[in-house]
Amino acid sequence: MKSFTAINIGDTGAELVTALKDNYTIISNNHLGEYNIIDYGAVSNDGTTANEVAIQSAITAALAHYGIYGYYGKVIIPPGKYYITSHIELKSNISIEIAKNAIFHFPDNYADSIWYAPAGTSLVYCYVNGGVYGGLTNNNSWRLVDLNASNGLTSYVMFCGFYNMRAINCDIGIKSLITNDGWITGIQYSNILISNPKIGVKCEQPNLSTNVMADCLFEKFDIQCGPATTNGFVFDGNSCVFSNIFIYDVVGNAITLSNKTSKNSFIGGAIGPLLNNIIDDGYYNKILSNDDTRISSSATRIPLIDAGVGISENQLNGLILLELTVDIDIIADPQIGKGIDGQVIVIANGVNTGKLTLDNGDGLMLSSQCVLDAGDTIMLQYSQTSDKWYEIARSNN
């Protein structure tokens, strides 16, 4: 921590004013819980001073602040270009606020992470906001965010956030790995730009029966693929939401959902020109982008609907894939059987099939009549209070 400026007997005028101002700033910042990395020895713009120790020291001070005052300490990283040679270990109950024009750079052969949570430790309520990482000369060997968990009681990552970041020429932009019975849950990523990664996002949980990666939010992702890119998203998690995801010009697979995945939703955004490069081997996943609609193979498949009966309660599923051979206009009341309060379903029409017409009313609250033609999709949510299904979104209508 920055030391107090000594006040000597006989100090007058400008010397005394300067010392008092310096000491007041130290006391004020410590009370507010703001810890500037410059005060811990960080040096910007020289290209040789390794700054990870200074940043780690400021994080340690912010963590101690939480223990003393009971509210988060904040690490401040001001504008400048910071050279680092090793990862920075994240700690619980802190926030790291990085200036928009703060840049992190490292040796060309750097093969470590930037923001790191090692297996064997726990991380909760940690938030990192901002920063530009890497550059044109880096060789796709480093990771921006690297979260690891190995034990649900002692090694987990929960309720953290990463915002407003840009990574250039990394190996993996966002990496999460769960081993043994670890947990990674409740993580939010927002406004992340990743340029020319090998893999944009890679989240793995090798043993699904004992570990959990779930309930995470990925929003406003822009993965700008380049010559090094093999995958946009490689994902093993469950019950996660991906909103406004943009993946362009990927040579390999834009999205790969393994057979361990279930109940993930990709909503909005665009997935480049190579839409066939979406692999979904999971269960009940929904991909509803501006370019395409994909439904997991585990969806309930309905080859025939009785117009006088509609879609029954027994046919309800998170994903309902229509395989109609003739056009159907449901006249039943209600058109869709009762669900569970808050239940969400997606009804998607297949290709080369008949149309399904749903009307506003008769158990449905729609923005307008919905005609599901080949490839069309509608998402509905049930309210037990009104005994109605409400439209959330539709595509290609």
Image (tube, rainbow, N blue to C red):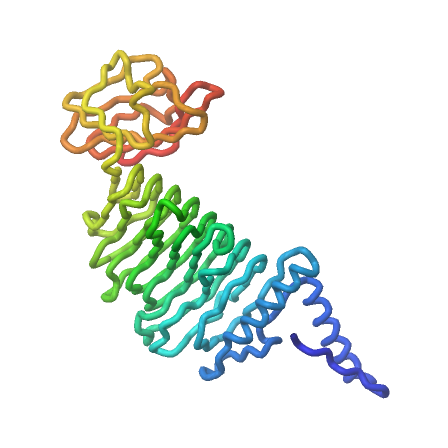
Q: Residue furthest right?
A: 10
Q: Quadrant of residue 142?
A: bottom left
Residue drawn where x is 48% and y is 62% of the image: 130
**Image quadrant assignment for residue 225:** bottom left
Vertical side of 85 occupied by 342: above or below: above
Which of 277/102 is in front?
277
Nearer to us in this view, 71 or 158: 158
Image location of residue 65, percent across then percent down: 66, 63
Residue 259 falls left or right of residue 50: left
Residue lying at 16% horizontally and 28% vertically, measured from the top left: 353
Which quarter of the picture shows residue 289? top left
Tell me the residue at 32%/17% (across/down): 335
Q: Position of residue 145 (x, y in %)?
A: 42, 62
User: In the displayed structure, does residue 86 sit left or right of residue 18?
Assistant: left
Q: Quadrant of the C terminus?
A: top left
Q: Nearer the viewer, residue 141 or 324?
A: 141
Quadrant where the N terminus is found in the figure: bottom right
Whether residue 342 sits left or right of residue 35 in the image: it is left
Residue furthest out toward the bottom:
10
Q: Is residue 191 left or right of residue 29?
A: left
Q: Position of residue 138 (x, y in %)?
A: 33, 74
Residue 89 at what x, y percent from top left?
50, 66
Numbered disc total = 0
Say above or below: 301 vs 61.
Answer: above
Residue occupying image coordinates x 36% and y 20%: 360
